Image: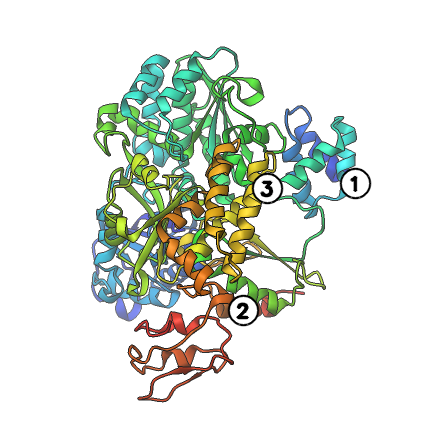
């Protein structure tokens, strides 16, 4: 299964120069993260050292080498959001979900909470994104309420 | 972000419709525009559109409003008032603000069917001041045309600039752009024409033109809005640039966090290729040009030219030392010009309307207009385009409508993490490249954040530094280690552990990092710290010497008390306090119990009389 997906991706970039980032983006799109074995697989097929892939994967914020939660909560931490109180909002959500210090995913793997530098929706700061849906003009209370509504509405 | 879906030009005739048919009207042209960008969607614009469909259907107008005529258009900039709805009947526009689905029925009933606009929901005078003080070149078409339809762009003279440019020699195009005085809008402000000239003289083929759409500054969304609202203007700009420097290959390096912008660029490239504006022998001039999109992967440093090139080549995005400059040795070692989105989108107008027209706008050294993302604690947030040299005061008070909750303006931050703060006392200064640099800030790519007295400048500096620290690629020591040490010092100051001499140490470190870093990130990273020390040294001192955060932001230093002189006994603080720390009764002044207070700041925010300190 994994190999089949990888081959499809390989076909797309076979003759392209400098395709390491594009390949990793496609791998992540396919699996939700970058499984280690895929890196070795591509390394062998393309004759590019695996260290190159790891180097790129760890350099860019977009790549994940570990599986993430089922639902992704992204809190914008851009300037406008910061000025308008992104930090208290994040702390509230982390507390609500009981995410441990230094972790970003809940123990049951349901939620991953991450920070993003800026989504460019500064006019409605602070901004919270739950699975790509954008919620604007948040406050700790509103964020907590939004999350509760989401939990109620989300199919298990 | 505000964008619009529009239900375009449909003949509307109030159909025979039970009791309310009353006035039978002659046919009229109706257009409904609803914002559906990130901001609009978050404010509920999708539901508003559904409501329009449902209600129009109920009124028997269904036959005239078909799915396929629902077009998306770009941003009009005024996102703070979403959901904004334009009702255009026979060319006359009425704009409604803060529209919710339940309001749709009344708008259709009174306005569309009976020509009687719902006065109390219409936008106020501030909507018009917001637009009147602006000079729109780039944003003129955003919000007016459908960005996913090349016909709409052609209808407003699209690709005429490229047609005209391709009929000129590359030398003539470069001279025209040089004469216009256009400077790079990515931040540094290098003369665009000069950059092209250097590249065109450089030996080596093929040459490349790269559009830098890696808008990584927190608090900035200009490039995204231009692409989402008018993607063809960027492609046309690249075509003109490609012809000028003799390049047949263009890359657009764009953040993966902008999915809608990427989608619209893909559509635009496809359509332009079909129409023959991209590909072989464009306009029968013998010139070939192709454009590819490369998605970034989330690294602020990739906005730096050499790091961006490394990233396109599929490597870690780390800058290298210059020279050689990209105009000589760029992508795959070949001569390369990198221009920002906004720079490129200016080109079609410069070519069609002429360099002297463009040079007539702005100041002596900063020509044309600049797009800013106006945000922060200001009433009218959104995307604005103003002539260079406009005063900061006009931006904040006329366009921005002044501060939220009528609080005091403390400073305006420009240039993002590379820039600095302009204190309220300098509000009359003109906004152009030189003036901003002279005050220790910079134009940057165009983020502009207004801050009030509830913003702590030390915290602000810490925020920006923690961003640059995190985004430092780690290649050179001053940036990697130096910013880390600066951040440690700032952190201890905000936690009440500041020491005598910390301010001097920050200045020393900051100055050294600026001098010794390899690339622009390191060279500018200390700016937010140095600039806030320069203008707000007293706040740093209050943190260190008195253990007080004057803006009540730094949690460890917060202490709230109610000033008995200022308290008007309204009880607002009592109602918002989540921990029951405030005691208050009607006609009595509020008192805060320090033991119960959790320092959340809700009372400070809520007090209309600034009596809580």
Measured along the vertical axis of the image, is residue B302 above or below residue B42?
above
Q: Quadrant of residue B62?
A: bottom left
B448 or B266: nearer the viewer? B448
Separation of marks 3 and 2 at Cα, in angstroms:
37 Å
The residue where tag 2 is placed is A144
> Residue B67 location in percent, x, y?
43, 50
B603 sits to left or right of B208:
left
Query: Which of the two marks, 1 or 3, is nearer to us in this view?
Result: 3
Q: How crowded is mark 3: few (under 14 residues within 10 Å), some or many (20 or more)?
A: some
Which mark is first along the chain, 2 or 1?
Answer: 1
Q: Is mark 1 on a helix, strand or loop?
A: helix
Chain letter behind tag 3: B
B168 or B468: nearer the viewer? B468
Q: Is mark 2 on a helix, strand or loop?
A: helix
Q: Residues within 10 Å of mark 1 (few under 14, many from 20)?
A: few
Separation of marks 1 and 3 at Cα, in angstroms:
34 Å
Separation of marks 1 and 2 at Cα, in angstroms:
38 Å
The residue where tag 3 is placed is B481
Residue shown at 79%/30% (left/top)? A44
B220 or B487: nearer the viewer? B487
């Amino acid at each position: 299964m994994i190999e089949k997906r990888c081959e499809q991706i390989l076909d797309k970039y076979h003759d392209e120069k400098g395709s390491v980032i594009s390949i990793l983006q496609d791998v992540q799109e396919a699996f939700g993260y970058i499984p280690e074995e895929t890196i070795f697989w591509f390394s062998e097929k393309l004759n590019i050292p695996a260290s190159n892939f790891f180097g790129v994967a760890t350099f860019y914020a977009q790549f994940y080498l570990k599986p993430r939660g089922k639902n992704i909560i992204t809190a914008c931490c851009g300037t406008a959001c910061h000025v308008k109180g992104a930090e208290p909002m994040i702390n509230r959500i982390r507390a609500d979900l009981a995410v441990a210090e230094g972790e970003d995913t809940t123990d049951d793997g349901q939620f991953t909470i991450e920070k993003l530098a800026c989504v460019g929706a500064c006019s409605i700061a602070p901004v919270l994104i739950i699975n790509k849906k954008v919620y604007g003009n948040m406050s700790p209370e509103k964020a907590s309420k939004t999350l509760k509504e989401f939990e109620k509405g989300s199919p298990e | 972000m505000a964008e619009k879906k529009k239900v375009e030009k449909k003949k509307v005739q109030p159909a025979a419709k039970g009791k309310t048919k009353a006035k039978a009207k002659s046919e009229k042209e109706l257009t409904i525009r609803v914002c559906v960008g990130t901001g609009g969607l978050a404010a509920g614009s999708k539901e508003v559109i559904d409501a329009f469909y449902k209600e129009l259907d109920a009124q028997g107008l269904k036959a005239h409003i078909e799915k396929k005529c629902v077009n998306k258009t770009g941003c009009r900039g005024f996102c703070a008032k979403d959901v904004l709805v334009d009702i255009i009947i026979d060319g006359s526009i009425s704009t409604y603000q803060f529209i919710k689905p339940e309001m749709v029925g009344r708008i259709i009933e009174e306005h569309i069917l009976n020509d009687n606009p719902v006065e109390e929901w219409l936008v106020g005078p501030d909507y018009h001041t917001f637009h009147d003080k602006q000079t729109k070149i780039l944003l003129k078409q955003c919000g007016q045309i459908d960005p996913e339809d090349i016909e709409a762009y052609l209808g407003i003279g699209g690709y005429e600039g490229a047609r005209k440019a391709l009929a000129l020699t590359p030398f003539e195009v470069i001279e025209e752009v040089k004469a216009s005085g256009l400077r790079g809008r990515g931040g540094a402000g290098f003369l665009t024409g000069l950059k092209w000239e250097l590249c065109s003289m450089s030996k080596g083929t093929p040459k490349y033109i790269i559009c830098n759409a890696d808008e990584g500054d927190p608090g900035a969304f200009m490039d995204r809005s231009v692409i989402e609202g008018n993607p063809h203007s960027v492609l046309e700009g690249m075509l003109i640039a490609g012809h000028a420097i003799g390049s047949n290959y263009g890359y657009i390096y764009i953040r993966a966090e902008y999915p809608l912008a990427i989608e619209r660029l893909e559509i635009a490239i496809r359509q332009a290729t079909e129409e023959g504006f991209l590909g072989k022998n464009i306009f029968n001039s013998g010139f070939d040009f192709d454009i590819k999109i490369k998605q970034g992967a989330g690294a602020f440093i990739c906005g730096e030219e050499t790091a961006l090139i490394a990233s396109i080549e599929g490597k870690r995005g780390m800058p290298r030392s210059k020279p050689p400059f990209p105009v000589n040795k760029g992508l795959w070692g070949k001569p390369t010009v990198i221009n920002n989105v906004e720079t490129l989108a200016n080109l079609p107008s410069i070519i069609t309307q002429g360099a002297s027209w463009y040079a007539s706008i702005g100041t002596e050294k900063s020509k044309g207009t600049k797009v800013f993302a106006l945000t922060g604690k200001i009433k009218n947030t959104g995307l604005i385009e103003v002539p260079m040299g406009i005063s900061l005061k006009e931006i904040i008070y006329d366009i921005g409508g002044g501060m939220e909750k009528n609080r005091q303006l403390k400073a305006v931050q420009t240039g993002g993490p590379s820039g600095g703060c302009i204190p309220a006392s300098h509000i009359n200064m003109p906004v152009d490249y030189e003036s901003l640099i002279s005050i220790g800030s910079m134009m940057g790519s165009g983020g502009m954040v207004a801050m009030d007295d509830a913003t702590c400048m030390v915290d602000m500096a810490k925020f920006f530094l923690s961003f640059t620290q995190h985004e430092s690629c780690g290649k050179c020591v001053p940036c990697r280690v130096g910013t880390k040490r600066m951040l440690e010092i700032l952190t201890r100051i905000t936690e009440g552990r500041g020491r005598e001499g910390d301010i001097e140490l920050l200045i020393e470190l900051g100055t050294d990092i600026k001098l010794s870093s390899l690339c622009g990130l390191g060279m500018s990273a200390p700016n937010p710290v140095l600039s806030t020390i320069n203008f707000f040294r007293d706040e740093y001192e209050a943190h260190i010497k008195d253990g007080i955060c004057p803006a009540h932001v730094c949690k460890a230093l917060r202490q709230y008390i109610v000033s008995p002189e200022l308290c008007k006994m309204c009880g607002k603080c009592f109602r918002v306090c989540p921990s029951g720390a405030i005691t208050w009764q009607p006609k009595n002044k509020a008192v805060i119990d320090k033991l119960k207070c959790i320092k959340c700041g809700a009372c400070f925010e809520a007090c209309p009389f600034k009596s809580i300190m």
